[in-house]
Image (cartoon, rainbow, N blue to C red):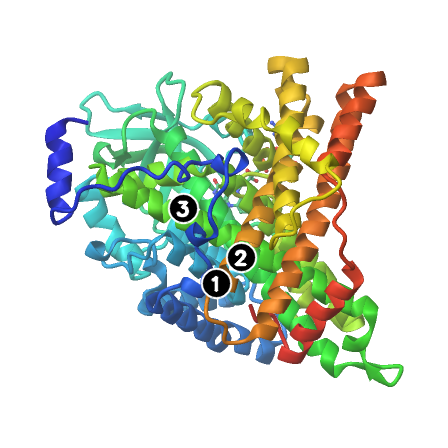
Amino acid sequence: MTQTTLEKAKVNKAGTAPARPNPRLKGGYFITGDTPPEELFITEELSEEHRMMAEMVTEFCIREIQAPFARRGRELAVTNEADKEEVLGLLKKAGELGLCGVSVPEQYGGMGLDFKGNTLFSKVMANGFSLATTLGAQTSIGCLPIAYYGNEAQKEKYLPGIAHGELIAAYALTEPGAGSDANAGKTTATLSPDGSHYLLNGQKIWITNGGFADVFIVFAKIDDDEKLSAFIVERHYPGFSVGPEEKKMGIKGSSTVQIYFDNCRVPAENLLGKRQEGFKMALNILNGGRIKAGAGGIGGAQFSLSKAVQYAVERQQFGQPIAGFGAIRYKIGDIAMRAFANEAALFRTADCIDRKEAELKAAGLPESEAKVQAIREFAVEAAIIKVKGSELVCYATDEAIQIHGGMGYAQETGMEMGYRDARITKIYEGTNEVNRLLSVGELTKRAVVSRELDLAGAGKKIPAFLLRQLAPFRPKTAYAEETRIVQGLKNAFLFLSGMAGKKMGKKLIDEQEIVLNLAAILAEAYVAESVLLKVKKLERLPQADPAKLEIQRQMMQLYLYEALAVARKSALEAIASFTAGRQKRTYNLVAHTLLKPYDVNPKELRRNIAGFIVEKRGYCF
Ligand SMILES: Cc1cc2nc3c(=O)[nH]c(=O)nc-3n(C[C@H](O)[C@H](O)[C@H](O)COP(=O)(O)OP(=O)(O)OC[C@H]3O[C@@H](n4cnc5c(N)ncnc54)[C@H](O)[C@@H]3O)c2cc1C
């Protein structure tokens, strides 16, 4: 960037000098350094605009989706033409409320919400069953490629229609032979001799919204290119066709089809971004999509929990509401704790992206480039959030059925639908296996290849940490024990990734089982630190309800207790996988010292958390 551009950026920012880059606004930084609680964004700080949007979305979901579901007693399925019309009607109503344009900049008719706002939207849309997937594709993967990479003419042509729900958008990357290995796609694009259009040939599979979308972001390789390029394809273009709706396990109200290109004629000006930029674009868009998928998972878990609590309070067995049984309280307390902790990590990440974007803009980067780079920066965290959110909603919907007993298995309560709908979240936006591998792979790349992260430097502090654990007296300052646990989780990752890397070098990447162990510890470190920071920050705020804060503190304690158990199992498994004999015994000792148990009473913690939620008749944090 030239000095002149920087100067211009300064002037554009009304004369304010760009702030010095925050060293903590770095993807993966959390594993090497500390973040002060005041820097953590918490949901209590969401703006009035955010809250109003969330209220509007909730009301829309209750009025237009939940109430009709209760009357109908069954879910909508787009394999049925009448239901498909209803889904289109819902999309139209959502468009009228502006919900199709949450991520579209205001100048193109959208709400132009920041990343936190979009994250909140995805979380709250979980109240809207499978319409969440439909609107997710519309507002995220379907339109952001144009918003971030489109030229002015493309933005003006498509974004206002998408924002108002007049144009439905879809994203077509996956092919029968190219799923996780997305760059292996065989769809081709050939420029006509006069340069006026491309001819696309090939097939895409599993395309959300494809049954009724007007605009498709299609990834294809031009000639013999190594990498994909992206195109905007309109439904009416000659040579474009759509297959029947897939018969799926869940999200039946969401359209999923195959699409075909048979010498499909796409105007040359519909090339999106630069040639061969498509693969990078696809990955960057997926990074953002992963956080939103995680948000949907967390929202879905909170929704299912509230439904289960309402049922548990009403349902009497053995002369008392089942909500009073320890076995049921265990489930309620456990889901709530996981939802609370993961939400702390979710909004921490979303806010980091917003702040990074502001930092990059202040340094002179154009808005869309700043957005893309900011999202890209937090790819490690995005992968963690996606895995955590999707596994949480699968767990929560399963346990919500269990709390409902036989009624959970019945169609009319909607619990079985939630369970089936949740399952896809572990598969799309990158499977959870791929995301777990990616979280560790990306972090390692930043340490070893680009040298942005000093994992080795952070690892050098482990011996001193271990010595402190052996000291008979340890400081009893507030949260000293919890801070020790979080640091222990980070150190366990640093120690094991360091030792495994030393032993296996580049071959470690092929030892996926070990990388998955490392990924589990990494994710626990991130979420555990986020929830601890959240509670520390909450304590500094004026308290409307001290009882609520006490429960939030207990959720944090329970999360740390559980995180240690996950990390210990993963650490010992990893050690057993790459060491033997004396080295194994030494590493085991180190792991046990780093991940020393936390002296809390998990039964009491779960009971107290559940008691509070039962009293409030649902998730209330
Ligand atoms: C309902 C639905 C909606 C979808 N919507 C869209 C959409 O709108 N647009 C779009 O482009 N795509 C969409 N997809 C596709 C989705 O993103 C893919 O299904 C997903 O990326 C996985 O690809 P795959 O199904 O080919 O599985 P595969 O890649 O074949 O994976 C099969 C299994 O192998 C594992 N695996 C694969 N590679 C590796 C590896 N390197 N290491 C370890 N394990 C590995 C996977 O984790 C998985 O468990 C959708 C899919 C569904 C089911």
How far is the residue under mark 2 from the one under mark 1? 7 Å
- Name the disc covering residue 448, or none: none
Q: Quadrant of ligand 1?
A: top right
Is residue 577 positioned above or below 552 on the image?
Answer: above
Helix, strand or loop status at disc 3: helix
Residue that mark 2 sits on: 536
Q: Quadrant of the N terminus?
A: top left
Which is in the foreground here, disc 1 or disc 3?
Answer: 1
Is residue 435 positioned above or below 85 on the image?
Answer: above
Q: Quadrant of the C terminus?
A: bottom right
Q: Residues within 10 Å of mark 3 (few under 14, many from 20)?
A: many
Q: Position of residue 343 (x, y in %)?
A: 54, 56
Q: Earlier in the sequence, mark 1 or mark 3?
A: 3
**Are the two marked residues, 2 and 1, in contact with CB atoms closer than 8 angstroms?**
yes
**Are the two marked residues, 1 and 3, in contact with CB atoms closer than 8 angstroms?**
no
Quadrant in the picture for residue 597: top right
Residue that mark 1 sits on: 540
Q: Position of residue 346 (x, y in %)?
A: 50, 51
Amino acid residing under circle 3: Cys
